[in-house]
Image (cartoon, grey):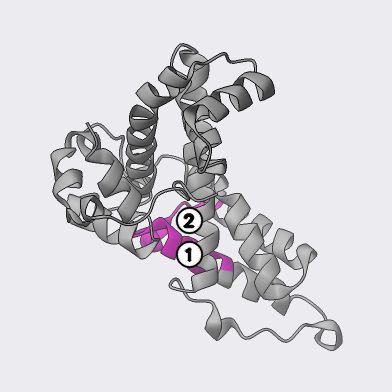
């Protein structure tokens, strides 16, 4: 799900990296980069879903996809990231699944071996970026939901999720929907009060999630990655909200 289907581009979203720069403290609070993790396999397992989706799409075979993932994880358990564990995690993962899939297909009897053009398996593939972006957003939504469970007086997840799914509804209509479809009771005024904090928190979580997939987490590098996966606009726009 896109984070802001009800938002259109505006002058506010063209504020460059100023909004991101003003929130630089977020980057300083993050844990070590993925390349320094003590458990390579534990880090990669978080992103199994987009890898499996991409493998199935490219190979057309769930068994090959699953065997390739098992091979990749087994290698990471035994060897760690090694000299290739640098840069962007999404680039590392596409190289990893390509290598594992080549080896997996190579073990299939020649007369049953599928013909796969591995030269098209590139980090900048639109399909891969779409799967990657989708998983990052799913992780952000889950984190926002966990935030809400910690403080039910600020139902940021429910408000943002409902508003995003029903962008044309008024606060009154949204309140009725939330009160009917969930265990949370909100007033229209509460929705109006919390929608901006909800968007801001969502943008913060995107920023944090993306940053954790980069070796270089300087603001320039993070902004470049956000732009590459089409998430720069909501982050810059929503972090600029007061």
Image coords of residue 21 (percent x, y): 15, 45
Tell me the residue at 44%/60% (across/down).
90
| Label 2: how many Cα within 10 Å (few below 14, some 14–19, many 20+) | many
Tell me the residue at 54%/77% (across/down).
121
Q: Does the stretch in magenta take in 16? A: no
Q: Is residue 25 visible?
A: yes
Between 204 and 192, the residue placed more toward the observer is 192
Tell me the residue at 19%/50% (across/down).
219
Image coords of residue 116 (percent x, y): 68, 83
Q: Is residue 213 left or right of residue 16?
A: right
| Label 1: how many Cα within 10 Å (few below 14, some 14–19, many 20+) | some
Q: Quadrant of residue 30?
A: top left
Q: Mark number for residue 129?
A: 1
Circles 2 and 1: CB atoms closer than 8 Å: yes
Q: Quadrant of residue 89?
A: bottom left
Image quadrant occupied by the C terminus = top left
Q: Which residues are magenta?
A: 78-97
Q: Is residue 207 left or right of residue 177?
A: left
Image coords of residue 210 (percent x, y): 37, 48
Q: Does the stretch in magenta take in 88? A: yes
Q: Mark number for residue 133?
A: 2
Q: Is residue 15 above or below residue 180?
A: below
Between 168 and 95, the residue placed more toward the observer is 168
């Amino acid at each position: 799900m896109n984070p802001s289907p009800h938002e259109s581009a505006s002058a506010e979203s063209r504020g460059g990296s100023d909004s991101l720069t003003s929130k630089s403290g977020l980057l300083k609070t993050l844990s070590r980069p993925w390349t320094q993790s003590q458990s390579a396999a534990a880090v990669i397992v978080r992103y199994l879903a987009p890898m499996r989706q991409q493998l199935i799409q490219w190979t057309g075979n769930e068994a090959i996809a699953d065997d390739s993932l098992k091979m990749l994880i087994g290698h990471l358990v035994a060897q760690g990231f090694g000299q290739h564990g640098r840069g962007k995690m999404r680039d590392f993962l596409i190289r990893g699944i390509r290598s594992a899939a080549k080896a997996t297909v190579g073990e299939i009897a020649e007369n049953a071996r599928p013909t796969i053009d591995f030269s098209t398996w590139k980090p900048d593939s639109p399909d891969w970026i779409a799967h990657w972006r989708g998983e990052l957003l799913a992780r952000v939504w889950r984190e926002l939901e966990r935030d809400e469970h910690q403080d039910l007086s600020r139902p940021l997840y429910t408000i943002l999720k409902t508003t995003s799914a029903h962008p044309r509804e008024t606060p009154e209509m949204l309140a009725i929907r939330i009160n009917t479809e969930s265990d949370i009771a909100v007033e229209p005024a509460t929705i109006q009060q919390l929608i901006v904090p909800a968007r801001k928190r969502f943008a913060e979580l995107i920023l944090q999630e993306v940053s954790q997939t980069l070796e270089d987490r300087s603001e320039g590098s993070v902004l470049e990655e956000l732009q590459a996966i089409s998430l720069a606009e909501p982050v810059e726009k929503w972090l600029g909200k007061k």
